[in-house]
Amino acid sequence: MCQAPSTPKIAQTMLHQWEEPCISGTLGSGTVFFSHCNLKCIYCQNYRISHEGRGRELSVAALADVFLDLQKQGAHNINLVSPNPYLPSIAAALTLAKKDGLSIPVIYNTNGYELPDSLEYLDGLVDIYLPDLKYFSTTVSAELSGINDYFETATVAILAMFKQVGSPRFDQAGLLTRGLLIRHLVLPNHHDESKRVLDWIRQNLPLTIYISLMAQYFPAYQAAENPKINRLLTEAEYDEVVDYCLDLGLENGFTQEISAADPKYTPEF
């Protein structure tokens, strides 16, 4: 499905300023954008690397050097974006980099479609899990991401992540140092889907969990061809989901302004 090579392939590295405040901080998150993906989301904002596979292949040793270089640049953390296809190589690179002095927190920034057995490779190597929890229903996940077992797979994986790192912990500057932070992108015409996702979080994780409710959706890639998602999210749709989240007692986390739905925040690949 992912069409990835056997060696790590990256599209870009950068000090990313547009993540959640507790991740980007003042200096930026040391972000490594990996090419290819194990989902086929028709609205992917990073489709040039996830679907088209733009990027360059690196050895494990070279990838470890990338991590160390980002630390030298002042990154608050190492942020592995869409790392799933390269998990064994990433685990090896992190092990090597830590031996050579990597000391900042490591973030596993994933679409959530993971296997618990695979995540065991990362136990002790990853400090922060940043998974999406995209959908509740099989019909929506099949239509929009090409997979019909997304929810059942992602929720099991998220519980495994939580078992490893627990609820978020922060340093004195407010930067995230360890824990689970769940992202959910609110989609137009899918507010009920968002509510079911939030219901699951409330029923299965403690109130100390953090959620990032994102309003940054815009109809990228093939989304213009789907009448359900071929427009921007309205403020009323987003506010309904935020209010529902708060009504559930889920008060820790982050929201976005509707103005976040702008292609200018998507890196150039």
Image: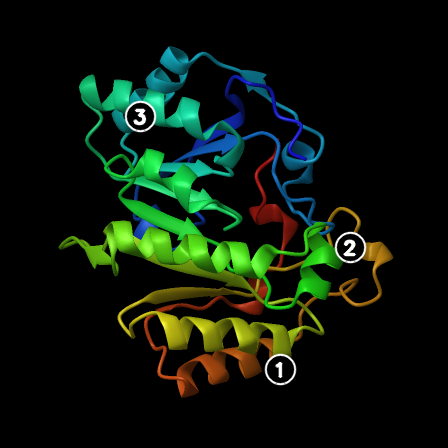
* Of 29 and 9, the residue lying toward us: 9
Provide the secondary structure element on which disc 1 rests: helix
Is any atom of residue 21 visible in this view? no
Could you give the CA–CA distance between mark 1 and mark 2, rounded to whole angstroms?
A: 21 Å
Against 264, is 133 above or below?
below
Which residue type does callout 2 highlight? Ala
Residue 9 placement (x, y as % from top left):
54, 22
Q: Report the quarter where the C terminus lies.
A: top right
Which of labels 3 and 2 is toward the front?
3
Q: Residue furthest bottom?
A: 247
Q: Determine the image quadrant of residue 31.
A: top left
Q: Earlier in the sequence, mark 1 or mark 2?
A: 2
Residue indicated by mark 3: 94
Could you give the CA–CA distance between mark 3 and mark 1, rounded to whole angstroms?
A: 43 Å
Residue indicated by mark 1: 236
Residue indicated by mark 2: 223
Q: Residues within 10 Å of mark 2 (few under 14, many from 20)?
A: some
Q: Residues within 10 Å of mark 1 (few under 14, many from 20)?
A: few
Q: Look at 26% across and 43% down and name the residue there.
A: 127
Against 56, is 149 above or below?
below
Which residue type does callout 3 highlight? Leu
Which residue type does callout 1 highlight? Ala
